[in-house]
Image: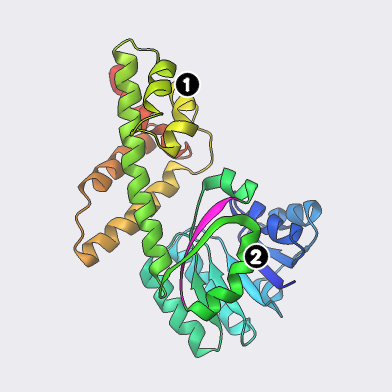
């Protein structure tokens, strides 16, 4: 079993670190708000560190699950000099590919390995240990860390060199944005047409319109319940990263750009913490104007 440090105990990191500990790894956690680390240590075998350096000291694998590029950069700047030679830094944060490539180079200069490994599956996937993980980095390093990440994953794929994991996560978010908007419009149309949404979904979910979002979110979308983990604020951050990258690689993302603005409307409605299925709320809100 490995000595692991897990940095960042949000709705994703808290259960992910728990799965590591449950798999028998020696886990030390750290969170900016120390009380979360203490809560984790009271719920799981393992310990909470009061400082970043204490958390990563002697760790074989250091996992980060933070918020955005500046958060990752600040933590990485502190921990990389403190990590032991031959250890592996794994970033589960959804961040830019540019940052992933930079951290790979910084780590290599200090004989530390790096893998960018953003995840998909949301809070439920983290809690159930069923995340999909998209990785960028060297094959030999991936082979070392894959069995450890298996504690909270249902699928782990090495996409390519450093940064490729983050690029794949951008593809994931681009696809989700279009699917959720389409489902929102379909459900809104069904209701406006006086149809029974349950009958409509029962019919179309057996055909080409089927999606994970349809299977798992249509009922709560119709009910106006948007408390299912991954928040609109975070989706806008992810789409910003994807749209920035698209400008660099000359991709055209008209639907993603439009849906990003629709999420801005949801934020303006006070729905920044609603989950991403809340796109339907702006359509229903338009009916009231």
How many numbered discs? Answer: 2
Contact (Cβ within 8 Å) of mark 2 with mark 1: no
Q: Which mark is residue 6?
A: 2
Determine the image quadrant of residue 255. top left
Looking at the image, can residue 49 be seen? no
Determine the image quadrant of residue 90. bottom right
Task: State the quadrant of the N terminus.
Answer: bottom right
Determine the image quadrant of residue 147. bottom right
Q: Position of residue 127 (x, y in %)?
A: 64, 47
Q: Which residue carries the number 1 mark?
A: 223
Q: Is residue 247 left or right of residue 90?
A: left
**How is the model colour-coded?**
rainbow
Predominant SS along the magenta part = strand
First-in-chain label (2 vs 1): 2
Q: Position of residue 163 (x, y in %)?
A: 40, 71
Label 2 crowding class (10 Å Cα cut-off): few <14, some 14-19, many 20+? Answer: many
Is 278 located above or below residue 107 in the figure? above
C-alpha separation, residue under disc 2 versus residue under disc 1? 37 Å
Is 41 located above or below residue 143 in the figure? above
Is 63 inside the magenta-drawn segment?
Answer: no
Q: Position of residue 193 (x, y in %)?
A: 29, 12
- Which residues fall within the magenta stretch? 130-137
Q: Which mark is residue 7?
A: none
Q: Position of residue 107 (x, y in %)?
A: 51, 83
Task: State the quadrant of the C terminus.
Answer: top left
């Amino acid at each position: 079993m490995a000595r692991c440090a897990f940095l960042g105990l949000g709705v994703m990191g808290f259960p992910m670190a728990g799965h590591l500990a449950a798999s028998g790894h020696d886990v030390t956690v750290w969170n900016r708000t120390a009380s979360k680390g203490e809560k984790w240590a009271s719920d799981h075998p393992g310990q909470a560190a009061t400082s970043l350096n204490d958390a990563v000291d002697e760790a074989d694998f250091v996992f980060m699950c933070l918020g955005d590029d500046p958060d990752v950069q600040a933590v990485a700047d502190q921990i990389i000099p403190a990590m032991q030679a031959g250890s592996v830094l794994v970033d589960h944060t959804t961040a830019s590919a540019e940052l992933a490539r930079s951290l790979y180079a910084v780590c290599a200069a200090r004989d530390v390995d790096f893998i960018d490994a953003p995840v998909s599956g949301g809070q439920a996937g983290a809690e159930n240990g069923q995340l999909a993980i998209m990785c960028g980095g060297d094959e030999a390093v991936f082979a070392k860390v894959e069995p450890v990440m298996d504690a909270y994953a249902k699928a782990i794929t090495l996409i390519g060199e450093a940064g490729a994991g983050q690029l794949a996560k951008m593809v994931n978010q681009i696809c989700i944005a279009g699917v959720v908007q389409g489902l929102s419009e379909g459900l809104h149309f069904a209701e406006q047409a006086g149809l029974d949404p349950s009958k409509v979904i029962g019919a179309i979910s057996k055909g080409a319109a089927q999606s994970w979002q349809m299977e798992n979110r249509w009922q709560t979308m119709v009910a106006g319940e948007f408390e299912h983990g991954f928040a609109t604020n975070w989706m806008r951050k992810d789409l910003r990263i994807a749209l920035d990258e698209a400008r660099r690689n000359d991709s055209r993302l008209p639907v993603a750009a439009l849906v990003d603005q629709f999420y801005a409307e949801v934020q303006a409605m006070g729905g920044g913490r609603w989950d991403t299925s809340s796109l339907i709320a702006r359509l229903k809100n338009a009916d009231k104007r």
